[in-house]
Image (cartoon, rainbow, N blue to C red):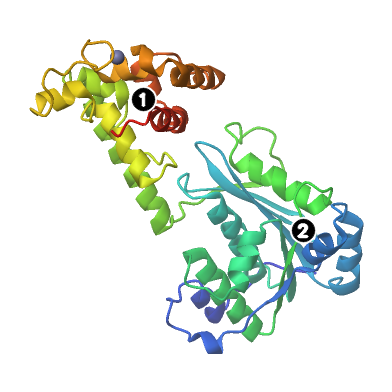
Amino acid sequence: MLTKPTITGDLLRANVLRVFDVPPWLLHHPKLDFSVFRYMQHSGTTTVAPLFLSRLVECYSTHHHKYTNGSKTASLTGCGLYVEQLNVRQSITINPYASLFSAELYGILRALYCVVTYSIPKALIITDSLSALQTINSRCWTSHIFVTKIVLLSSTLIKAGREIAFMWVPGHRGVPGNEIADSLARLATSTNRHQDVSQIRLKTVNTCVSYAVICQHLRDHFDNVWNTQYQSDPKGTSYKAVFPRRRKEDLGLAHADTVSLFRLRTGHCKLNLHLFRLGLHQDGLCDACHTPETVAHFLLVCPQYHAQRAILLAKLRKIGVTANTADILRNPGASCLVQHFVDATNRTL
Ligand SMILES: [Zn+2]
């Protein structure tokens, strides 16, 4: 019979240990069970619920089984924890900026807190996050703050005589505990989480987020600020027709092709009109039809490239790009096709 826990100083301390308080060679590592994963790899089957349940009986019948799961939506992040023997059901909303990986790790961390809180002697923590368990197993225990806490707390618990093991099961494969943890995690990221939640403990924790996530959010924020100012500026209308957003693009082209496309977009290329502006051409007119050789003329009008243009326009139609200079040049999907057209005309831009 489990009673309300007494939290010892050592176990509490594990939660506030700093990264280098314990050298790695003195840590006690938990058992990580990837047997279901290996079975799936070798057999090719995805029906593993019976195998998993028989392994629970065979190897972990005296352990408490704690199922954890993470969930993330556009505006919320959370995790679920279900402890089978105690019927503990927790639905925890964490920092909305945290990643799904962080949510999975935080669910595992909450399961360890539960081991401390209820003085559980043997615990098996079951998750469907392979990446979370592989990171814990990789011994890169300073790579993420939750990984550090999981490794340190596990070590302290094992040193105190507890048995801690982690096991992977695939998600959505009919493992009952995993399905319950999954629904608890989804409840944590649901906007109606206050409805119909008897027997479920709802909790909100303002967890920290990783450095990489903070950097990404800062980049997105300042990118939006920059773009708002860029769009509201009345200057540069023709430039903005080709570059609607201030953002680096990876067009998947070779460097020379990217340069060529950029020249077409800005009009600063080796077509006769621009050469004339630089004083390098006598009149800026097209050699074939004696009208100003602009980018639009080169791409869509000049009859000497009629055959190459027919191929270009047919391919553009397939990807839904209209025969309009700005539309062609600003569409990343068209960049390769434009480059093929330039190559086919034997022009150097
Ligand atoms: Zn022409």
Near mark 1 (Cα within 10 A), the count class, few <14, some 14-19 or many ≥20, is many
Residue 221 relative to residue 267: left or right: right
Comes first in the chain, label 1 or label 2: 2
Would residue 75 be seen by someone viewing this image from the given angle? yes
Q: Name the residue under label 2.
A: 169
Q: Does 227 appear above or below 317? A: below
Quadrant of residue 42 within the rendered picture: bottom right
Residue 136 on image: x %, y % = 60, 70
Along the line of sight, which residue is nearer the eye, 331 or 248?
A: 331
Name the mark on residue 329: 1
Determine whether the residue tagged by mark 1 lies in a helix, strand or loop.
Answer: helix
Q: In which quarter of the image is the N terminus?
A: bottom right
Whole-number angstrom distance, CA of label 1 to CA of label 2:
48 Å
Residue 279 on image: x %, y % = 7, 27
Q: Does 98 appear above or below 340? A: below
Q: Does 171 appear above or below 117? A: above
**Residue most extreme to the left:** 279
The type of residue carrying mark 2 is: Val
Q: Quadrant of ligand 1?
A: top left
Q: Which residue is drawn at 63% across and 67% down?
A: 134
Would residue 248 be seen by someone viewing this image from the given angle? no
Residue 286 on image: x %, y % = 24, 16
Q: Are marks 1 and 2 in contact (CB under 8 Å)?
A: no
Residue 227 on image: x %, y % = 28, 30
Along the line of sight, which residue is nearer the eye, 285 or 268?
A: 285
Along the line of sight, which residue is nearer the eye, 294 or 173?
A: 294
Q: Which residue is drawn at 63% across and 79% down?
A: 157
Along the line of sight, which residue is nearer the eye, 260 or 47?
A: 260
